[in-house]
């Protein structure tokens, strides 16, 4: 189906990108064969570190003419194999396209290249008295990757997800054509939204080379609240009460004592409280201290009235850093606690979070396997990790498949979906097909064929 890359192809690619940016065979570091979890591995035939839209356009024109598969990679922090070149071919790394190009203070937008890191954009926005609201836990992910998976993160409760902040995209099509999708306007009802098809498509439809993103004014005050509960059930059951209280927290995160202890060990730093079994961590922001304090006090009193053990105000920079750095390290901390792990990124209705978490606890007991979790309690996006520990290859594969099958089936039964923000990639496409069915998948495949008739862009992912 695909043509093998020849020496002539390599020479042409070097003419386009320069000798120092094109790597072949043993010149390619093994890290490029996998993403963060490493469960799916395949080396590309050629790695190219790209620097511009025009360069990517020239590469894609060659790849299209020669029918060579192309996969795009940012920081490689994904968890589902979306940035792995499963069909070989060319791997384009966009991390050198890392410039913040323009800030439009009048229209509250910022223009960035795809290799800008989330933490760089967040810092730039705050320095200019703005906030870029999407806040996924992995701050070293690129903006291109965030857009490609429609990342959500911890502030989604109040502010929404990445899709809500993308105004315009510059993309390179599989045939090399450069297009602008969307517009630098607040409203757009001008035909089908092709921009929104690109967001969340995991690099299967077009290559993002520039993005115009919406900003909001930076709230003047922000404070967090750490609320311990005697067990996870009572912690999760508090969330609907909080949401119905007419107070809108910026974030509502849930975490267990075990996960916090993993993070303490990993970071070598103490969490403010580890005596209790379960915690809800909330943030409130606003433009007046009075407003923020009123919201915080309202939720603190509510939680205490329905079974919380205490309510700790996290208002100093030192305390905030301690709590949120621990929360940000949960994934790496769990990963460090085991020999191998895989992840289930389901999203379920908010009033079903407790039911699903309880189900995972029973599943862990049934199969005698460790399944820690944490997640965004306010929007039902749960991050469940199945840990291998000392299982041999056969037992690990057997238990992993049984647990995944059970969890995705349970999520579907209670009205949930396969992925809340990490995407489908290669690892989860079987579960997506099982949940959506033939008709839904056929429409997705039809969209893919319209954009990419030769199926050369990130093949073998999402719906194929």
Image (cartoon, helix red, strand yellow):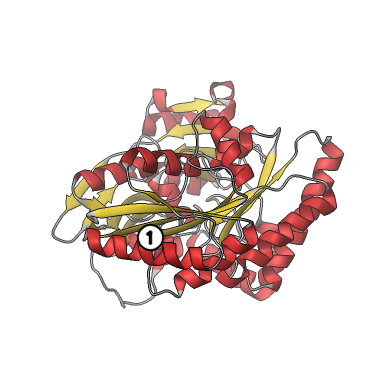
Q: Is residue 115 visible?
A: no
Q: Residue visible at 57% across and 48% down?
A: 82
Q: Pick whichever, 373 or 24, lies toward us.
A: 373
Asked which secondary structure carries label 1, the reply is: loop
- Vertical order, 285 against 446 (above or below): above
Q: Residue 96, how many percent across, how many down?
A: 36, 34
**Outermost right residue:** 394
Label tally: 1
**Outermost left residue:** 106
Q: Pick whichever, 92 or 237, lies toward us.
A: 237
Q: Residue 418, how many percent across, how many down?
A: 63, 62
Quadrant for residue 99, please give it.
top left
Q: Residue visible at 66% across and 55% down?
A: 428
Quadrant for residue 444, please give it.
bottom right
| Mark 1 lies on residue | 250
Q: Pick whichever, 325 or 332, lies toward us.
A: 325
Q: Residue visible at 24% across and 56% down?
A: 219
Q: From the viewer's perspective, is 291 left or right of 455?
A: left
Q: From the viewer's perspective, is 454 left or right of 315?
A: right
Residue neighbourhood size for the residue with mark 1, other residues' Cα within 10 Å, grouped as few (<14), some (14–19), many (≥20): many
Q: Is residue 365 visible?
A: yes
**Quadrant placement of the C terminus:** bottom right
Q: Pick whichever, 144 or 86, lies toward us.
A: 144
- Vertical order, 127 against 232 (above or below): above
Q: Residue 116, how many percent across, how many down?
A: 34, 41
Q: From the viewer's perspective, is 206 left or right of 380?
A: left
Q: Residue 151, how many percent across, how many down?
A: 46, 55
């Amino acid at each position: 189906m695909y043509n093998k890359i020849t020496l002539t192809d390599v020479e042409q690619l070097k003419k386009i990108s320069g000798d120092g940016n094109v790597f072949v065979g043993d010149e390619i570091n093994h890290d490029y064969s996998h993403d963060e979890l490493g469960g799916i591995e395949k080396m590309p035939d050629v790695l190219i570190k790209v620097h511009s839209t025009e360069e990517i356009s020239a590469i894609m024109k060659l790849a299209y003419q020669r029918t060579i598969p192309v996969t795009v990679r940012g920081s490689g922090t994904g968890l589902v194999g979306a940035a792995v070149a499963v069909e070989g071919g060319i791997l384009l790394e966009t991390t050198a396209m890392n410039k913040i190009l323009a800030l439009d203070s009048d229209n509250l937008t910022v223009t960035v290249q795809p290799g800008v890191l989330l933490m760089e954009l967040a810092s730039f926005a705050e320095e200019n008295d703005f906030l870029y609201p999407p806040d996924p836990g992995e701050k070293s992910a690129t903006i291109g990757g965030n857009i490609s998976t429609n990342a959500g993160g911890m502030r989604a409760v109040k502010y929404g997800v990445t899709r809500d902040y993308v105004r315009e995209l510059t993309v390179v099509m599989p045939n090399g054509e450069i297009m602008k999708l969307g517009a630098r306007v607040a409203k757009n009802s001008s035909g089908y939204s092709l921009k929104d098809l690109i967001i969340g498509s995991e690099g299967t439809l077009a290559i993002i080379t520039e993005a115009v993103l919406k900003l909001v004014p930076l709230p003047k005050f922000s404070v967090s609240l750490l609320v311990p509960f005697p067990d996870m059930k009572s912690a999760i059951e508090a969330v609907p009460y909080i949401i119905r209280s007419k107070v809108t927290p910026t974030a509502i995160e849930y975490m267990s004592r075990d996960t916090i202890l993993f993070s303490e060990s990993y970071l070598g730093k103490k969490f403010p409280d580890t005596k209790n079994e379960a915690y809800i961590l909330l943030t409130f922001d606003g433009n007046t201290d009075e407003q923020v304090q009123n919201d915080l006090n309202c939720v603190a009193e509510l939680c205490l009235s329905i079974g919380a053990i205490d309510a700790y105000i996290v208002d100093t920079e030192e305390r905030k850093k301690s709590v949120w750095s621990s929360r940000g390290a949960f994934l790496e901390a769990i990963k460090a606690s085991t020999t191998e792990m895989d992840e289930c990124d389901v999203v379920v209705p908010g009033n079903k979070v407790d039911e699903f978490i309880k189900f995972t606890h029973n599943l862990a007991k049934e199969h005698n396997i460790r399944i820690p979790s944490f997640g965004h309690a306010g929007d039902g996006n749960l991050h469940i990790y199945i840990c291998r520990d000392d299982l041999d290859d056969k037992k690990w594969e057997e238990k992993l498949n049984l647990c995944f099958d059970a969890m995705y089936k349970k999520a579907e039964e209670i009205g949930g979906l396969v992925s809340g923000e990490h995407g489908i990639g290669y690892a989860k496409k079987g579960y997506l097909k099982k949940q959506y069915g033939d008709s839904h998948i056929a429409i997705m495949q039809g969209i893919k064929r319209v954009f990419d008739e030769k199926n050369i862009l990130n093949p073998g992912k999402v719906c194929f």
